[in-house]
Amino acid sequence: MKTYFISSVLSGGGSAPLPEASAEDWVNMINGFQKGALSSRLGIPMIYHIDAVHGHNNVYNATIFPHNVGLGATRDPELVRRIGSATAREARATGIPYVFAPCFAVCRDPRWGRCYESYSKDHKIVQEMTEIIPGLQGDIPANSQKGAPYVGGNKKVAACAKHFVGDGGTSKGINEYGTVIDQQELLSIHMPACSDSIIKGVSTGFVISDWEGIDRITSPPHSNYTYSVQASVLAGIDMVMLPINYKEFINDLINLVKNNVVPMDRIDDAVGRILLVKFTMGLFENPLADFSLVNELGSQDHRDLAREAVRKSVLLLKNGKSGKITDPVMLIIWATNVVDGQLHGTTILGAIKSTVGSSTEVIYSENPDGNFVKSNNFAYAIVVVGEHPYSETAGDSPNLTMAEPGPSVISNVCESVKCIVIIITSRPIVIEPYVSSIGALVAAWLPGSEGQGITDFLFGDHGFSGKLPRPWFKNVDQLPMNVNLSWCVARPCILIVMVALVLGL
C-alpha cells in the first residue's frame, strides 16, 4: 500500500482474513491496509470494497438475506430499504465502508447465470427496489444537490449501482455476452433504475472495471496488455479491478503517461472523481475503523428481518386440497445438497425440526428410493429440490432443467405419499413434467440463512404474499418470454395460478 500508492482494495469472492474470521479480525486486517495507505507520501486513505448483494454475504456469521430475485417477489420497497440498512451496519461492523451493491440489472432471459441478482424482468419493479440505496447510504438531505454522492455517517456505506446499464439484456442469457437492443429499449428498459439510483445519491461517481475486465479487451485476453491499459483508461474507466497483475498495470500506466499516450488530465479527471467519493465517505476525517459495531454482525434483529423477507418472498405455485399440516403427524423430509450445507443460520431441515410438536417424528433421507418410501407409513413428505449452488458463468443454462437427484426424488416420493415440493432456485426452471404428481408446489428462490421463514408459511402461521418476479415458462422454447407481469398475477400464467390459500394437501 505504501510503495504503490494503491487507492482501493477489494475482497474477491471467498477471500477473508482467515477461516471463520470474526468482525474484529476483519477490522484489524482492513486497518492494517489503511495504515499502509496513510503512511505513503501523500497519506491518502484507501477505500475497502466488498460484494454485499444479499447481505454481507462474504463474511462468516453474517445475516444472509434472500437474493434479489426473491426480494423482487415481495414487491416491498420498504422491506428492501430495511435490508439495505441492516447490510450497511453489518459491513461497518467489519470495518468496510463501501459495498458493491445493489445490482440493478433487468434480467430479460433466465438462462443467464446471474439472473438471481436481478429483482425482476420488469424494469418498474427494479426501479421500486432502488429504495435499498437510502437504506445503505441514508436519506440525502432535503437541500442537497440532486445526483450528488452521499453517505450518512459511520453506520452507512457507499453504494454502487452495478454493473452497467444493459447488462441484464445479455443475448441468449450468456454471461458477459453482448446486449443487442435498440436505443429505445436501452433507455426504456435498462436505464430507469440506473437513473433513479443516481437521483437517490448513489455514491459511486466513477467507473470501475470488473474482475480482470480490461484483460479481455484483446483476444485472447492479456495478449497486448499495454494496449488494454491504454484503451480502458482513455475510454473513461477511472478505477481498475486487478486481482493479480496490479504491478504490471501500474508500470504500464506510468509509462503511457510519461510517453504522453495517456494525457495527465485524464488521470486528474479520474482521481478527482475518486477523491470526491472519499471525501463524501468521511475517510479523511475517520480513516480507521473501530470495534463499536461488531455486535451488529449477524444480530438477532437482522436475522428476524431476514426471516420476514423469506416469508414475503416465497411463492405458492400449486395448491392441493384445503387444509394444513398439523400435529400429530409423521413427517419425512427429503432434500438435495441445497438444504443443509450452511455454516450458520437455520437450515430448512433445522427449522422444521424446531417447529413441529414433540409428537411429530421427522425422518430425513437425502435421496430415498421408491421401496423405502412404500415400506414406511408416512403421512406427509416435504421434498426440497432445485438447482445446485453456482455463481456467474457457471450458472448459464441453455435448458434450465432441475438438477438431479431432484426429479428422481419427486418421482420416488410424490407417487407414493402426499407431498409438498419446495424449489430452491435462482430463477424459474422447467417443472411442468412433475407438476401432476405434486400435491403442493412452492418457490422459495434463494432464501438465505433464515430457514424458519420457510416454516412460517409451511405450517400455516402466515399466508403467501409473494408474486412472480418474472414469468414461469413450460419450456425454454418459450424464452425470453418478457410478457407483462401484471397479466401473470391477475390470471393463470402458463401453468402457474396465483392463489393466496393456506397450503393444503
Image: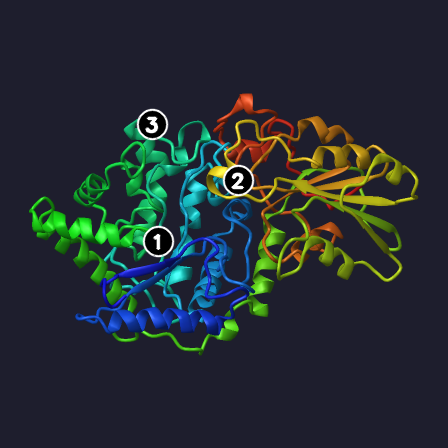
Q: Residue furthest top?
A: 477
> Amino acid under label 2?
Pro
Label annotation for residue 281: none
Residue 455 locus on image (x, y percent): 71, 54
> Helix, strand or loop at disc 1?
loop
**Classed neighbour count for the residue bearing mark 1: other residues with Cα under 10 Å, few (<14), some (14–19), many (≥20):** many
Residue 384 locus on image (x, y percent): 71, 44
In the figure, 409 relative to 80: above or below?
A: above
Q: Residue at x 45, y 67 (%)?
A: 89
Please state if 420 lies on the left or on the right of 153 as rendered.
Answer: right
- Label 2 belongs to which residue? 469
Mark 3 to mark 2 CA distance (whole Å): 22 Å
Mark 3 vs mark 2: which is more N-terminal? 3
Q: Nearer the viewer, residue 310 or 372?
A: 372
Quadrant of the frame with the C terminus = top right
In the figure, 327 relative to 488: above or below?
A: below
- Label 1 belongs to which residue? 160
Q: Nearer the viewer, residue 505 or 399?
A: 399
Please state if 108 lies on the left or on the right of 277 as rendered.
Answer: right
Mark 1 vs mark 2: which is more N-terminal? 1
> Helix, strand or loop at disc 2?
loop
Q: Nearer the viewer, residue 414 or 250?
A: 250
> Amino acid under label 1?
Cys
**Classed neighbour count for the residue bearing mark 2: other residues with Cα under 10 Å, few (<14), some (14–19), many (≥20):** many
Residue 473 locus on image (x, y percent): 58, 28
- Label 3 belongs to which residue? 181
> Amino acid under label 3?
Ile
